Image: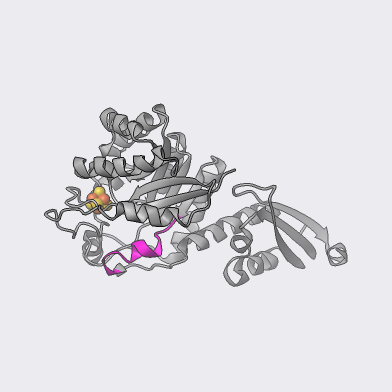
Amino acid sequence: MKKHRNIPIFVPHLGCPNTCVFCNQRKISGCEKADFSAAEREIEEALATIPAGTDVQIAFFGGSFTGIDREDMLFLLETAKKYIDAGKVGSIRLSTRPDYIDEEILDILARYGVRSIELGIQSMCDDVLAASGRGHTSAQTERACNLICERGFELVGQMMTGLPGSTLEKDKYTAEKICQMGACGARIYPTVVFRGTELEAMMARGEYESREMEKVIAEGAELLEIFARNRVKIIRIGLQASELLTDGGETASPYHEATGELIWSRYFRNEAEKALSGEETAGKCAYITVPRGSVSKMTGQKKANTVYLKEKFSLAEIKVRESEELSGEEIEINLEERKRAYAT
Ligand code: SF4
């Protein structure tokens, strides 16, 4: 399988008319004119670092791409299309809002070589959307997802957890709906309260309470289970460091830079716990096999998972190894007598 690389181009939604309570982009004045003249240089620079044979997408991230000034959108699409026509880039990827998707927009996107559309779904519960000031409904999201999938685009669902009015049950419902609506991938963003946002004001008025990290991690792991069961690939969990730096990146809620890694670790711990439950484990050695690149997720930070599992199941030892043969989020556990374990 070809390696995949995105060339990210940040497209702020200048003068966005929406009022999402968590948004820290709205301070940017609506009078400012966007300057995308650097896009071509950014693409060239990125291309120079990408090996031949890679599946490359130019990715317009950061805001609601199909809601920005139409001239700007067409300029960026034309810029990207030149690289597709020259065979240097495979396709375009973008992120947008559900209410900025219709037949006409999809016609334009298809014409310019867009393959993947990441939709800011955030929640599929109307009360949560309203309390978060999103300005669209779950019915609009459902319609957008149907249109995107019917037209053959790849759909990626972005959801936020811990939004105002949400609960674990509501977040799980959103995750299930994203899978049902045909997404091939998902991004999960635990809500972060940035300084200066309406959400911070809500917190000060006692109308919103941020979650402790332990809750963010435990609940995030439950959502991963839903996506894994439905074979929907998780592209990312949590904001990137660069996104945290927007507006100085000051947060008014607990935040851990490694939120994604911690949630993955809890997911693997839960899976191992499920597999070991009901087995004769005392004094045995557990060989845990995980997909390539997942050993640290399984062992956990400072070996927290292996220490936890060893103690809970009275295991003599735990060995974690990776295998090319496992994919996605699969794990395999073999229990062996301690004697044999030392002999191998
Ligand atoms: S998060 Fe909401 S308010 Fe902020 S730019 Fe996006 S659509 Fe606009």
In the rendered image, residue 239, in percent from the top left (x then y), is placed at 39, 59
In the rendered image, residue 108, in percent from the top left (x then y), is placed at 29, 32
Residue extending furthest left? Answer: 31
Q: Can residue 289 be seen in this snapshot?
A: yes
Which part of the image, by quadrant, shows the C terminus? bottom right
Residue drawn 30% across and 29% down?
107
Which part of the image, by quadrant, shows the N terminus? top right
Q: Is residue 336 left or right of residue 40?
A: right
Residue nearest the observer in this picture, 316 or 78: 78
Span of residues in magenta: 237-248
| Magenta span includes 151 | no
Q: Is residue 126 left or right of residue 276?
A: left
Residue nearest the observer in this picture, 173 or 181: 181
In the rendered image, residue 88, in percent from the top left (x then y), is placed at 44, 44
Whether 143 is drawn above or below 20: the answer is above
Residue nearest the observer in this picture, 43 or 213: 43
Residue drawn 61% across and 57% down?
293
Residue nearest the observer in this picture, 273 or 177: 177
